[in-house]
Image (spheres, helix red, strand yellow):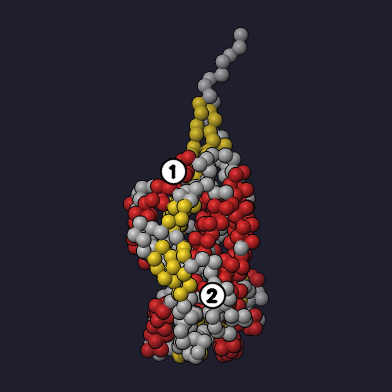
Amino acid sequence: MSSPDSATYELLIGGREAPGTRGERQALTDPASGQEVARVAVGSADDARAALEAAEGAFRESNWASDDGARRVKALLKLAGLVEAQAESLAQLETRNMGKPLRESRGDIAYVVRTLEYVSGLADKVEGETIPVPGARFDYTLREPVGVTVHIAPWNYPLLLSVRSLAPALAAGNAVVLKPASLTPLSAVAFARLARDAGLPDGILNVVSGPGREVGEALVDDPRCASVTFTGSAEVGRRIAELAARRFVPATLELGGKGPVIVFPDADLDRVARGIGYGIFGNAGQMCWAASRLLVHESLRPALVDRVRAAAEALKLGPGWEDGVEMGPLVSADQARHVLEYVTDARDAGGQVVTGGERAHGPRFDAGHFVRPTVLADVPPTSRAVREEIFGPVLTVASFQDPEEAIRLANDTTYGLLAAVWTKDLGLAHATARRLEAGMVVVNEAPVSFPQTPFGGFKGSGLGYEQGARALEPYTRRKNVLLNLGTPKRKG
């Protein structure tokens, strides 16, 4: 695999690349090999404030928001084309930085392209409405960009989850500041370089990497921040919500999940096993919407667990950039240790490790952060492995006797992001979907989403939605205008 196109990645503020006020650099390593990938500038609170200043100036002076949206349509479409032209190099960069298999990174970049294409079509459709009111009056609304929006992205889908919120904020006419995750900032910087080439005015898109506690809080707590979007842990999400609430700043928060997979007696077990494999072992389970809790009808449990175990053991594990690899390493040593702690807790609580539950060893694995695909059975429902988001390739298995019990078990969680249902009975599927406490339900599918479908959750999974035809709404404000037309003059 080729090396990244540049060994040094800077901050991007006001259209210029800069090393940051402290001049610090962080070495990033390949999670599969431990080898250094690149060095990236480490931003500070001062850099965060400089980015906000640049964004505010660009919002007021560049005319990015002042036309009918045609300029934004063209720029975002051009950016989609540039990303598509650089798709392979971006995918390789993503894999080397984050660790996921190259085929998954390629899919992520294709999703970025499609998101930009879809959202560009909304940029010239930011429309108000007229409202009938009594008397000689005319009432209408305007939708305006909020100004400067802040976007704090996670490390599991570095570019995809950055662009998911950046694109609609830009399409609505805002200036944006992106803080990528400290572990995976490389594709964000590469994307920002392409945005300049696409014609985005200097300062409209800024990128500041660095520690979340310093850089992230400086961005959200600044009076120039008019909106914040965050994807990540519930703990950090609560802190961001607190900071935003102090100034009544709108916040869109996507905070993870503990997705149930309900398998009814008539399900096609071979299809289910494949879907489960993708839903929990894709991206090494490092997914907010991971289908991590298998709830299977008791009549099917032995046969399905055997199929899932076989599928897990058949996965080709290895460095993401090797041909044919189906599951890569976890993103860091800390994440691997964190995941295995849950396995230990489950075992200590009386759970059974059906397969996996340990690091992968051997010449290809020892230098990286590889954890084998894991299936846990008979884990007490009160254990951490069942209750908390693990963010790794760990599936828990429980069984049910009837639909009522299945729905009760599925809803018995503080999260509510995604749920899956497997059945040939469409009436049962619809009835179950209506009762599940989740923002998204897939039927006879592995977890899947598209730029045109809403993405968001209930309960502890966060606030607000991204994607879909209403994707621009969180980044606009609505103004009502009422005109008194006066009493018409009589003629003669």
Residue at the image position 51 percent from the left and 28 percent from the top: 483
Q: Is residue 164 visible?
A: no
In the image, 188: left or right of 442?
Answer: left
- Percent across and percent down for residue 285 are 50, 76
Camera-side mark, 1 or 2? 1
Which secondary structure lies at badge 1?
helix
- Left or right of residue 247: residue 192: right
| Label 1 vs 2, first from the N-terminus | 1
Q: 10 Å neighbourhood of mark 2: few (<14), some, or many (≥20)?
A: many
Relative image position of residue 391 (x, y in whole percent): 46, 75
Furthest residue to the top?
Answer: 492
Pick the residue in front: 191 or 315.
191
Q: Which mark is residue 351?
A: none
Q: Which residue type does callout 1 highlight?
A: Gly
Q: Are marks 1 and 2 in contact (CB under 8 Å)?
A: no
> What residue is at 48 percent from the left and 40 percent from the top?
61
Instruction: Look at the image and tell me in which quarter the C terminus lies.
Output: top right
On the question of residue 57 being in view, the answer is yes
Q: Position of residue 111 (x, y in %)?
A: 60, 64
Q: Which kind of residue does numbered mark 2 sit on? A: Lys
Element type at marker 2?
Answer: loop
Residue 385 at x, y percent in the picture: 42, 80
Q: Quadrant of residue 352?
A: bottom left
Q: Where is 469 relative to 427, above or below?
A: above
Give the camera-side residue of 72 and 189: 189
Residue at left offset 51%, top offset 75%:
99
Which residue is denoted by mark 2 in the rendering? Answer: 100
Q: Is residue 262 above or below residue 416?
A: below
Q: CA distance from mark 1 to mark 2?
A: 38 Å
Disc 1: which residue: 57
Q: Is residue 400 left or right of residue 24?
A: right
